[in-house]
Image (cartoon, rainbow, N blue to C red):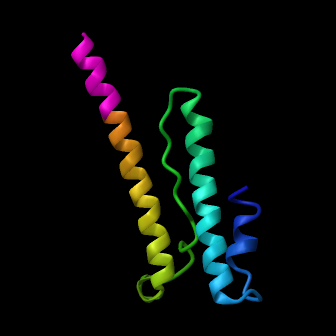
Amino acid sequence: MQNMYGPMFFQNASWPESVRNDFSAHVHRFMSQLTDNRHKSQGQTILYIPDEGDRMEGAQIHRNKELVQRLETAMIHWTRQIKVLLGGQDATETAE
């Protein structure tokens, strides 16, 4: 989904910017949860990495506050995933 529909959504300039920003945030949240749930059933922790800004220059990303906020939201989710993973390891080590 990310490789097929993502570029079409994220590069669509016909939507108003507020709609595009809101929709992008929801797509990233959905993809993050989908990635997490799919791999969690296999006992894996996979971090979803949004590729929305990978075609932009650093200065462009820095000026786009909405994009920065979406990327920060992804990093917050990564932090939660890592804490859960490390918490599970601590419980396993304590049981041994």
Establish if 94 lies above or below 69. Answer: above
- Identify the residue shown where x is 59% and y is 45%: 35
- In this image, 13 relative to 22: left or right? right
Residue 47: percent from left, percent from top: 48, 48
* Quadrant that contains the C terminus: top left
- Identify the residue shown where x is 55% and y is 62%: 50
Establish if 76 lies above or below 47. Answer: below
**Prevailing SS of the magenta stretch:** helix
Residue 53: percent from left, percent from top: 54, 74
- In this image, 7 relative to 74: left or right? right
- In this image, 83 relative to 96: left or right? right
The image quadrant of residue 38 is top right
The image quadrant of residue 1 is bottom right
In front of the other: 93 or 52: 93
Q: Residue 4 magenta-drawn?
A: no
Which stretch is magenta? 87-96
- Identify the residue shown where x is 57% and y is 27%: 42
